[in-house]
Image (spheres, coloured by chain):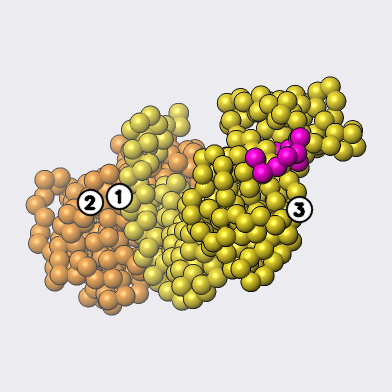
Chain colours: A orange, B yellow
């Protein structure tokens, strides 16, 4: 069973003219648990749209969407919000941390309104990502790479099934980018499906599979159907976590 | 087929569980709201100031109107509690007979009317001589002066048998005190008491009168009878009862009562209070518009942040709570400051102007205006925050995130 799956998904935006923009054209896409997929393609090809549809931020115009084998094509706003919270982790290109909250509070944001306190879990995650000494810093006091790690920690606070990242290394130097990718490696070892939109060859190197999107048409969306670039990923659910990098 | 893997939104299931969760959800919302407000202190302070002024206007004008009304009530207070019954000359009745007085007593002898005292008065005019000067005054004959009047000097006898009771005005004009001797229509009488200056307007005009025992009069009927009630309402009831019973067959008596006039004066002051409150409310509405503006600006600026919250799984309800809490906090802070300011201002006014009666200002009904203004301030915050909050919470996160 796939963590997340699109079947014949089409997304049309009503254009300004008579022709609607087809951002996704009959896309079949699936990610297995613990798989790291890189999505590449030229600007405007529909990559962000793909992530939005996968992440239940936007609905496909046609086709089906499944999350852990359950049809989630059409949900109410409330159900979608709950499903996002439960199963999806987002890492946005420009971090999107809340400036008034500390690192720990940003990480715990998805659970901020729930009974119980998730700050211990948030602090653990930050510690894993080498930010144990930055817990109470506000985003303005953090570097770009640190912010990105806080954003990743936030996406993992609810132990999602799917991690979606838009240009996760987009505005980071190579070294910081590599440490971010190392985090992804670790996350996928816990069985999380990782989908990263990227222009960065480094990300493609780390990915188990690279799919290409051109004008809304996706190549190699289903694993095994088209020969993937790399061998099958080494999945070890019990893999011990390595200590966080500094 | 469309079953959410995440289940329904938490807390929607309702019941007491939902209600408790609802309350619990406010704590993080308020704390987050407070931080958002601190981000743009100047803007927040200006919005708070707006509410503060609005609340000050409502509370201040409300209390001002109330103090005016209370003051007027105090000044005219007793007018409404007396009914003066006099013979109806038009019907040929020259004086009130003992039977008339008895009929009046019977008419008001009713617990519903409050059992007012009935004090019949003989009346005449005479020259009153003091030690050094003299004046022309009304001379009344009264048996139980204690029921209708109060003494400033000396004691009012239960039964007036001898001596003279002198009104405050006459006593001052002639330089008289208790124990002095006064000449009334030629005969010398000892002054047993001087009346306190009357606080009210009354056709009896006790200040300019001298009260002798009934035995000093050889008249065969009373000139008038005073009905002294506890309150305006019982006075009106007493007047109605007398009209109904004593005037049943024949219009024997004329009634002079000011209760109706007092009602009208009170109505006027109620109107004035409402008008002043309305004036205050206008400035509170202006404050509401400024909160609306602040909240709209701040939600537009924070569009992406709100989109992120929604994207990572914060429900619309919780976003709404944060934003409502922001508006509510502005309202509450402004209302608290405005209330405090009103209290200080009123206290300062009382301290600075001795003309203002502190007892009127400390009247508990003024607290009601303070509470009203406080509630209005918070309410204005929430009402004007509602639209921007609702709008921001319902925006689709995809759109909000696209910068
Ligand atoms: N809300 C929208 N309304 C109309 N058209 C849209 C909307 N969002 C995206 N599009 C169009 O859909 C197409 C795909 O957009 P998308 O943002 O997915 O591209 P992308 O692959 O992420 O590009 P980039 O690499 O530049 O981020 C583009 O042609 C874009 O103009
Ligand atoms: Mg994009």
Extreme residue toward the top, this view: B249
Relative side of A103 to B33, left or right = left
Q: Which residue is mark 1?
A: A111
Q: Chain of mark 1?
A: A
Question: Which residue does the image show at 24% across and 61% down from the upper left?
Answer: A104
Q: Which residue is mark 2?
A: A118
- Give residue A245's position: percent from left, percent from top: 13, 68
CB-based contact (under 8 Å), mark 2 and mark 1: yes
Q: Which residue is mark 3?
A: B125
Question: Which residue does the image show at 76% across and 35% down from the upper left?
Answer: B220
Q: Which is more N-terminal, label 1 or label 2?
A: 1
- Give residue B307's position: percent from left, percent from top: 45, 58
Instruction: Please say whether residue B335 is visible from this viewpoint.
Output: no
Mark nearest the camera among 3 and 1 is 3
Q: Quadrant of the N terminus of chain A?
A: top left
Label 3 – label 1 distance at C-alpha: 93 Å
Q: Residues within 10 Å of mark 3 (few under 14, many from 20)?
A: some
């Amino acid at each position: 069973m796939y963590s997340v799956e699109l079947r014949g998904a089409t997304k049309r935006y009503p254009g300004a003219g008579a022709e609607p923009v087809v951002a996704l054209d009959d896309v079949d896409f699936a990610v297995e648990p613990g798989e790291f997929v890189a999505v590449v393609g030229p600007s405007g090809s529909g990559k962000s749209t793909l992530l939005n549809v996968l992440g239940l931020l936007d609905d496909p115009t046609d086709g089906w969407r499944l999350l852990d084998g359950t049809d989630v094509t059409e949900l109410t706003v409330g159900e979608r919000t709950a499903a996002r919270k439960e199963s999806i982790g987002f890492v946005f290109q420009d971090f999107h941390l809340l400036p008034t909250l500390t690192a720990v509070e940003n990480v715990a944001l998805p659970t901020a309104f729930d009974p119980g306190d998730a700050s211990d879990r948030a602090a653990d995650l930050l510690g894993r990502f080498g930010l144990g000494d930055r817990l109470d810093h506000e985003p303005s006091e953090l570097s770009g790479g640190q912010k990105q790690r806080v954003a990743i920690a936030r996406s993992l606070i609810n132990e999602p099934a799917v991690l979606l990242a838009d240009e996760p290394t987009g505005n980071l130097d190579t070294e910081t980018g590599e440490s971010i990718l190392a985090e992804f490696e670790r996350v996928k070892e816990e069985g999380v499906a990782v989908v990263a939109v990227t222009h960065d060859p480094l990300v493609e190197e780390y990915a188990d599979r690279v799919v290409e999107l051109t004008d809304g048409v996706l190549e190699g969306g289903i694993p095994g159907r088209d020969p993937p670039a790399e061998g099958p990923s080494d999945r070890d659910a019990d893999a011990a976590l390595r200590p966080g990098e500094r | 087929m469309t079953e959410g893997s995440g289940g329904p939104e938490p807390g929607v299931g309702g019941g007491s569980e939902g209600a408790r969760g609802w309350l619990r959800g406010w704590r993080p919302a308020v704390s987050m709201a407070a931080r958002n407000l601190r981000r743009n202190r100047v803007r927040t302070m200006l919005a708070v100031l707006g509410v503060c002024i609005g609340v000050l206007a409502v509370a201040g004008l409300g209390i001002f109107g109330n103090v005016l009304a209370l003051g007027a009530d105090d000044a005219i207070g007793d007018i409404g509690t007396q009914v003066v019954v006099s013979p109806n000359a038009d019907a040929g009745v020259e004086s009130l007979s003992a039977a008339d007085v008895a009929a009046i007593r019977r008419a008001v002898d009713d617990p519903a009317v409050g059992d007012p005292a009935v004090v019949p008065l003989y009346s005449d005019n005479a020259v009153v001589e003091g030690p050094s000067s003299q004046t022309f005054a009304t001379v009344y004959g009264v048996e139980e002066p204690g029921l209708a009047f109060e003494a400033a000097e000396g004691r009012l006898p239960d039964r007036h048998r001898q001596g003279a009771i002198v009104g405050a005005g006459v006593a001052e004009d002639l330089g008289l005190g208790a124990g002095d001797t006064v000449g009334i229509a030629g005969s010398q009488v000892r002054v047993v008491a001087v009346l306190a200056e009357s606080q009210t307007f009354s056709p009896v005009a006790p200040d300019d009168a001298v009260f002798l025992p009934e035995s000093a009069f050889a008249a065969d009927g009373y000139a008038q009878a005073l009905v002294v009630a506890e309150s305006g309402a019982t006075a009106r009831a007493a007047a109605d009862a007398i009209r109904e019973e004593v005037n049943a067959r024949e219009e024997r008596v004329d009634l002079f009562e000011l209760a109706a006039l007092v009602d009208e004066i009170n109505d006027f002051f109620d109107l004035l209070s409402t008008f002043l409150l309305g004036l205050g409310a206008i400035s509170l509405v202006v404050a509401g518009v400024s909160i609306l503006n602040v909240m709209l600006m701040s939600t537009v600026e924070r569009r992406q942040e709100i989109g992120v919250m929604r994207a990572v799984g914060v429900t619309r309800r919780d976003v709404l709570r944060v934003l409502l809490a922001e508006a509510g906090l502005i309202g509450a802070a402004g209302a608290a400051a405005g209330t405090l300011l009103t209290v200080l201002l009123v206290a300062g006014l009382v301290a600075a102007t001795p003309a203002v009666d502190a007892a009127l200002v400390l009247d508990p009904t003024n607290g009601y205006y303070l509470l009203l203004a406080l509630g209005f301030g918070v309410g204005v915050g929430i009402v004007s925050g509602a639209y921007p909050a609702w709008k921001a919470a319902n925006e689709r996160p995809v759109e909000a995130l696209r910068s």
